[in-house]
Image (spheres, rainbow, N blue to C red):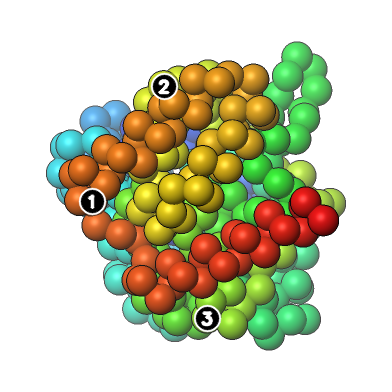
Amino acid sequence: MLKTAIIIPAHNEERLIAACLENYLSQTVRPDLILVVDDNSSDNTYGIVSSFSKLHPWIRGLRFHSEAVHRPGEKVVNAFNFGLSSLDVDFDLIGKFDADIILPEDYFENVVKAFEQDPELGLCSGLLYIKKGEKWIYESISNREHVRGPVKLYRHSCIRAMGGLRPGLGWDTADTFLLRYYGFRMQTLAELKIKHLRPTGASYQNSTAINQGMAYRNMRYGLVISLLAAFKMAWIKGSLGIIWNSIRGYYQAKRDQLPYLVTAEEGGFIRKYRWMLIGKKLF
């Protein structure tokens, strides 16, 4: 059985963290380690994690003191990387999971099996569902082949090949291109339905679209692909304002000379891959 460690960056998660950890206890195949990285919480997140640790030594808490400035994408990756650097065992699989998800009980049993069956599989997950009324429906902010940020389970050799996760806006899309660049595959298992307790971008605000535009630039999409991506999101959300705000974000990142998430060579691969996907949809 592949050895698995799950790292959960957490900030003020006392409302959800107990249910999250109870969910891991109920798994038919448990991870070998759950590490909650408490990033400057002002509530009782760390205390709740500590109470679990006393009963279950494979659940651990770690304090991380990041800067108080809010930097979307950067803070969560820095907390994850801090947790990753603290591991003293060479795990086969490394997860970056959020505290607001509930997994089906056979989640790790099935995902670990997928990794065991395919040595080239670098990233795998189920699909995220959100509650609408009394029903759980697919959270359709990305296609069903995309492994979402709250449930990233990587082969450790894949993370090493990528040089770790890249802190900044767009990290959770950049990794899906980078793993392909370094010879790995990505897979989602549609039968594994994950409950997402805190939906992503429930109201698609101006700042969300601006951040998305900044991410396009950080991943070296170039203006044309960025425009096409903005048009697609505007179509999905039914808001033309998304196009304007995405391009605002693109040029804001360019003006501020934000660091790229990928090298020029990696960026060239990403653009080529994006054009290939666009071509498949058009022809």
Q: Name the residue under label 3.
A: 182
Q: Is residue 275 left or right of residue 114?
A: left
Give the label, 1 or 3, closer to the camera. Answer: 1
Amino acid tagged 3: Tyr
Q: Mark 1 points at which residue?
A: 258
> How crowded is the residue under tag 3: few (<14 C-alpha within 10 Å), some, or many (20+)?
some
The location of residue 251, given as percent across then percent down, is: 31, 40
Q: Say above or below: 178 vs 99.
A: below
Q: Say above or below: 183 vs 4.
A: below
Q: Mark 2 points at which residue?
A: 206
The location of residue 43, given as percent across then percent down, is: 29, 29
Asked if residue 186 can be seen in this view, the reply is yes
Name the residue furthest top.
133
Marks counted in the figure total 3
* Disc nearer the start of the sequence (2/1): 2
* Disc nearer the start of the sequence (2/3): 3
Query: Residue placed at 59% from the left, 28% from the top?
Result: 234
Query: Residue placed at 40% from the left, 58% from the top?
Result: 220
Amino acid tagged 2: Asn
Contact (Cβ within 8 Å) of mark 2 with mark 3: no
The location of residue 87, given as percent across then percent down, is: 36, 73
Q: Say above or below: 11 vs 24.
A: above
Q: Which mark is residue 214?
A: none
C-alpha distance separating marks 1 and 3: 24 Å
Asked if residue 107 can be seen in this view, the reply is no
Q: Is residue 112 left or right of residue 171?
A: right
Q: Which of 271 and 160 is in front in this view?
A: 271
Identify the image quadrant of residue 166. bottom left
Query: Residue placed at 79% from the left, 17% from the top?
Result: 134
